[in-house]
């Protein structure tokens, strides 16, 4: 079974631009979560989607948004990019229903975003 | 919110040595995972272990949920074990993992 995939792997943008990152979960997984990793703040939760609905959102400004499609693929968008948005963006998927091992999260390789 | 603390922050060992990494958390959890982040940034799943003990080859983990800590043991370390190890927890009703700051492990040949 294929793992979580993310595209693109690397991205360079300039301040003020916007960017869209894509994540395809493991087949059969309905929950997709996004995390931001920076040297200063570590790994921080952005948001989680399940069956096309946002179930939880982290403490990030409204410039960060996301969505999930009916095939469970997810995209996140960052508008009006700032230098501080430079980070590794990680996507994770899980079965997402109920409790226990169904909620074990599996991560993709990440998208490394550099904002100049 | 829940706090997750990992220790030590850095660990340098010689190949063949054993190591113990610790994760303390400040509230009851219903999910605890250990990850190894490889040099390219991907988080590799090591254990899903909200309680009890598990073993996988040279790695094992123990979570004592009532005392709010988990331990990751690495025996006979190899240079390929180098990297950052993260503990992450999820509390009841929350749909997110909260990560510790990680332990950077360096295994020298």
Image (spheres, coloured by chain):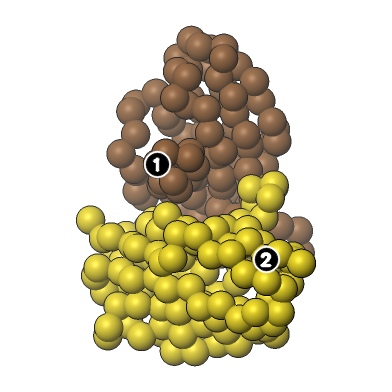
Q: In which quarter of the image is the C terminus of chain B?
A: bottom right
Q: Is residue A57 left or right of residue A49?
A: left
Q: Residue at x 46, y 52 (%)?
A: A50
Nearer to us: label 1 or label 2: 2
Label 2 crowd (10 A; few <14 / some 14-19 / many >=20): some
- Circle 2 is placed at which residue position? B107
Q: Is mark 1 on a helix, strand or loop?
A: loop
Residue A57 on image: x %, y %: 34, 43
- Of the numbered discs in the image, which one, if any, rests on residue A77? none
B100 lies left or right of A59 = right
Tell which of B89 and B104 is nearer to you. B104
Q: Residue A41 carries which label?
A: 1
Residue A30: where, in percent of width, then height? 54, 57
Q: Where, by quadrant of the figure, is residue A47 drawn?
A: top left
Quadrant (top left/top right/bottom left/bottom right) for the N terminus of chain B: bottom left
- Chain A shown in which color? brown
* Circle 1 chain: A
Picture colour for chain B: yellow
Between B67 and A67, which is closer to the camera in this rendering? Answer: B67
Residue A32 seen by the camera: yes
- Give coordinates of residue A101: x percent, y percent: 50, 75
Element carrying mark 2: strand
Q: Is residue B32 placed above or below A23 in the rendered structure? A: below
B9 is higher (above) or lower (below) than B60: above
Please report the residue visible at 70 percent of the width from the left and 36 percent of the height from the top. A9
């Amino acid at each position: 079974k294929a793992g979580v995939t993310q595209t693109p792997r690397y991205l360079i943008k300039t301040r003020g631009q916007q960017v869209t990152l894509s994540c395809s979960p493991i087949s059969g997984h309905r929950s997709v979560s996004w995390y931001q990793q920076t040297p200063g703040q570590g790994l921080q939760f952005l948001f989680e989607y399940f069956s096309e609905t946002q179930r939880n959102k982290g403490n990030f400004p409204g410039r960060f948004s996301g969505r999930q499609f009916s095939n469970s693929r997810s995209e996140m968008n960052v508008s009006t990019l700032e230098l501080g948005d430079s980070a590794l963006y990680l996507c994770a998927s899980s079965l997402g229903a109920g409790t226990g091992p169904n909620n074990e999260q599996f991560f993709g390789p990440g998208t490394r975003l550099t904002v100049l | 919110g829940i706090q997750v603390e990992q220790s030590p922050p850095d660990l340098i060992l010689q190949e063949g040595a054993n190591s113990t990494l610790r994760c303390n958390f400040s509230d009851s959890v219903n999910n605890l995972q250990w990850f190894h982040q490889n040099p390219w940034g991907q988080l590799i799943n090591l254990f899903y272990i909200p309680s009890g003990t598990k073993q996988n080859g040279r790695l094992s983990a123990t979570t004592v949920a009532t005392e709010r800590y988990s331990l990751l043991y690495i025996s006979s370390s190899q240079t390929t074990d180098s990297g950052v190890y993260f503990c992450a927890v999820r509390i009841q009703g929350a749909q997110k993992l909260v990560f510790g700051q990680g332990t950077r492990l360096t295994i020298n040949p």
